[in-house]
Image (cartoon, helix red, strand yellow):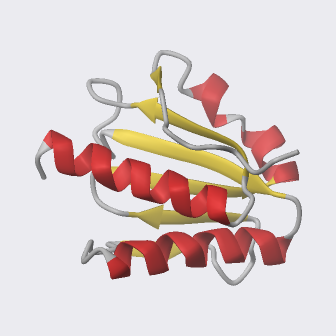
Amino acid sequence: MELDNIKHSLQLAANACDDKRAHDITALNMEGISVIADYFLICHGNNERQVQAIARGIKDTMSENDIDIKRIEGFEQGRWVLVDIGDVVCHVFHKDERDYYNLERLWGDAGHVALDIESKEG
């Protein structure tokens, strides 16, 4: 996938998270750090239903834009849902799991990517 398309997918996913009131939406540039994906998108919800709604929102947004989802894991439990869009991997956490796994610290070498979202948190 071309870089512009990858960044477009990242932005679409971030907007989908924001639409479902995800908290602390963060994007990490994983190029040269991980072979898994070029970008990680990380956010959390406060309960299992919200986590599932966020993941479903990402899936629906990608489908509406003709972007293939490679796989979704962890949806049933709603604690850590991984939405694999290929070059972008979205990690939708329950708040407790996000605090525990702390991917931002684990991948501390990754640069943060600016996202164009107007957060609805408040």
Figure quadrant of residue 18: bottom right
Q: Give percent across and percent down for residue 109.
A: 48, 15
From the top left corner, tell me how far across and down residue 116 is, in percent. 49, 38
Camera-nearest residue between 2 and 121: 121
Quarter that holds the C terminus: top right
Residue drawn where x is 34% and y is 25% of the image = 33
Q: Quadrant of residue 9?
A: bottom left
Task: Identify the residue shown where x is 64% and y is 63%.
Answer: 19
Which residue: 55% across, 63% down?
Answer: 16
Left or right position of 117 against 8? right
Q: Is residue 79 above or below residue 26?
A: below
- Label total for image: 0
Where residue 6 sits: x, y (%)? Answer: 25, 48
Q: Residue furthest top?
A: 109
Q: What residue is at 40 percent from the left and 74 percent from the top? A: 71
Left or right: 103 as drawn, with respect to 79: left
76 vs 50, nearest the viewer: 50
Above-or-below relation of 34 to 36: above
Position of residue 64 relative to residue 101, above or below, is below
Image spot of residue 119 (x, y percent):
69, 45
